[in-house]
Amino acid sequence: MGFSYERELPSPEHLKELLPVSPQLEQIRLDRIDYIKKILSGDYERLLLIIGPCSA
């Protein structure tokens, strides 16, 4: 599959500077990451589905 770039994408660091996240949203993100870690480690008996794109 061939790709051609129209323009360079901004780096994650640059996006974080342009679009800062509030402390409240950052805490929600951290809580969700912790929750996912607990599911993957078996601390929670839940099923985690990761569904991605069907094609690139």
Image (cartoon, rainbow, N blue to C red):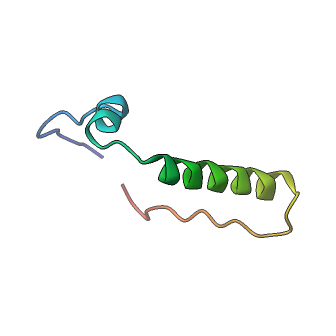
Question: Residue at the spot x=30%, y=46% of the render?
Answer: 1
Please state the horizontal and vertical placement of residue 37, each as a whole percent of the image: 74, 50
Question: Residue at the spot x=61%, y=48% of the render?
Answer: 30
Q: Hey, which residue is sitting farthest left in the picture?
A: 6
**36 to 15, vertically: above or below:** below
Please state the horizontal and vertical placement of residue 53, each as a whole percent of the image: 43, 62
Question: Residue at the spot x=44%, y=65% of the render?
Answer: 54
Question: Residue at the spot x=29%, y=31% of the render?
Answer: 14
Q: Nearer the viewer, residue 44 or 30?
A: 30
Q: Is residue 51 left or right of residue 14?
A: right
Please state the horizontal and vertical placement of residue 33, each as a whole percent of the image: 65, 50
Q: Is residue 14 left or right of residue 33?
A: left
Locate residue 36: give its quadrant: bottom right
**Quarter in which the C terminus is drawn:** bottom left
Q: Nearer the viewer, residue 46 or 56?
A: 46
Locate residue 8: give its quadrant: top left
**25 to 8, vertically: above or below:** below
